[in-house]
Image: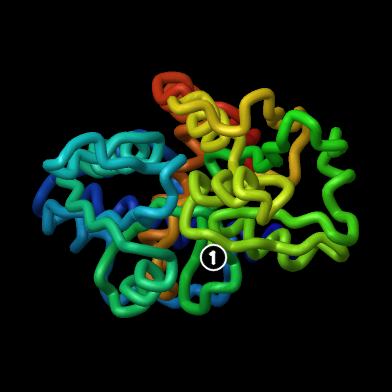
């Protein structure tokens, strides 16, 4: 029965691609094969994928807080980073123009998605978001701790003890993960990783939690922060980077999920990770 259901969903996805190939605009969506939607609850979209392609524009959303994923490179707002490279490639294979919007935080971004203000968003997975579907991950980013030189903490497991204070950039996926998993340590929330390090420097926290890439960039930038400090070699968790699509847009979701998997298979994701010098990044194997 499971195989029959999968075949039915794959057949539906193939039908979308056939319709697009036969459309009057003559555009094709690239050389990836469609896959089934992982969620049987996704409804047929009211904005067909073929119509989006004919419009010539893909509305792409980013969260400004995801500085490991996306950064503005200059005052003009030029976007750089793995997320920007993935969005550019998605628009290229769809033969459309990417129109970017950056939101101040996840709340604003996902609310805008539920209002239909963007087509896809390059984000850290947040499965608790109602009305949003997430593709399989294209990168897992290691999260770890930065500790002062004389800290007795040697491994991630040493952190969760009574009286130890963990400073971090509040409100992100790592905050939510540690809130659920730390049993004894206390979380000190700040507005950035830089401010979290300042809390340790001021004696108001004992360790900093963040992505390995963020910690290495901040720790290496002048002036030196926590001289002699150590970034732990092991990992708290791996944040999955995914593409979000508003629920109900099943054909768009199928296409983007397949794009992500194909980008992993052909080495595109590994290439953009290398070009962006992204530390602590793992490209997961293509999923079933």
The answer to whether residue 185 is left or right of residue 64 is right
For the point 10% across and 50% down, the residue is 25
Q: Quadrant of the N terminus?
A: bottom right
For the point 18% across and 44% down, the residue is 77
Residue 114: percent from left, percent from top: 36, 77
Residue 223: percent from left, percent from top: 45, 28
Q: Residues within 10 Å of mark 1 (few under 14, many from 20)?
A: some
Mark yes or no: residue 23 visible. Answer: no
Residue 192: percent from left, percent from top: 48, 52
In-front residue for pair 276/233: 233
Mark yes or no: residue 132 visible. Answer: yes
For the point 51% across and 53% down, the residue is 124
How many numbered circles does the render carry?
Answer: 1
- Which residue in the structure is indicated by mark 1? 171
Q: Quadrant of the C terminus?
A: top right
For residue 101, which quarter of the picture? Answer: bottom left
In-front residue for pair 226/246: 226
The answer to whether residue 220 is left or right of residue 62 is right
For residue 91, which quarter of the picture? Answer: top left
For residue 222, which quarter of the picture? Answer: top left
Q: Would you place residue 200 above or below residue 11 in this image?
A: above
Q: Secondary structure at mark 1?
A: loop
Looking at the picture, the colour scheme in use is rainbow
In-front residue for pair 159/76: 159
The answer to whether residue 285 is left or right of residue 244 is right
The residue sitting at the front extreme is: 202
Residue 96: percent from left, percent from top: 17, 46
The answer to whether residue 201 is left or right of residue 153 is left
Q: Would you place residue 230 above or below residue 86 in this image?
A: above
């Amino acid at each position: 029965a499971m195989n029959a259901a999968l075949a039915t969903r794959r057949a539906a996805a193939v039908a979308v691609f056939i319709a697009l190939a036969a459309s009057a605009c003559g555009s094709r969506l690239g050389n990836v094969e469609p896959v089934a939607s992982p969620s049987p609850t996704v409804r047929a979209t009211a904005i067909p994928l073929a119509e989006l392609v004919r419009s010539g524009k893909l509305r792409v959303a980013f969260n400004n807080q995801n500085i490991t994923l996306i950064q503005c490179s200059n005052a003009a707002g030029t976007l750089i980073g793995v997320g920007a490279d993935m969005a550019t490639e998605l628009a290229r294979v769809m033969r459309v123009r990417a129109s970017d919007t950056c939101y101040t935080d996840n709340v604003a971004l996902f609310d805008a998605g539920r209002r239909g203000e963007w087509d896809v968003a390059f984000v850290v997975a947040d499965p608790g978001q109602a009305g949003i579907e997430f593709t399989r991950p294209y990168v897992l980013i290691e999260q770890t701790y930065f500790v002062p030189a004389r800290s007795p903490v040697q491994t991630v497991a040493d952190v969760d003890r009574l009286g130890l204070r963990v400073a971090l950039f509040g409100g992100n996926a790592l905050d939510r993960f540690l809130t659920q998993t730390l049993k004894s340590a206390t979380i000190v929330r700040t507005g950035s990783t830089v401010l979290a390090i300042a809390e340790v420097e001021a004696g108001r926290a004992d360790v900093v939690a963040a992505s390995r890439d963020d910690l290495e960039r901040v720790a290496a930038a002048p002036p030196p922060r926590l001289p002699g400090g150590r970034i732990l070699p092991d990992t708290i968790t791996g944040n999955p980077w995914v593409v979000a699509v508003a629920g109900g847009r099943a054909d768009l979701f199928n296409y983007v999920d397949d794009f992500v998997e194909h980008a992993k298979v052909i080495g595109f994701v590994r290439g953009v990770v290398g070009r962006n010098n992204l530390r602590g990044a793992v490209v997961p194997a293509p999923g079933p």
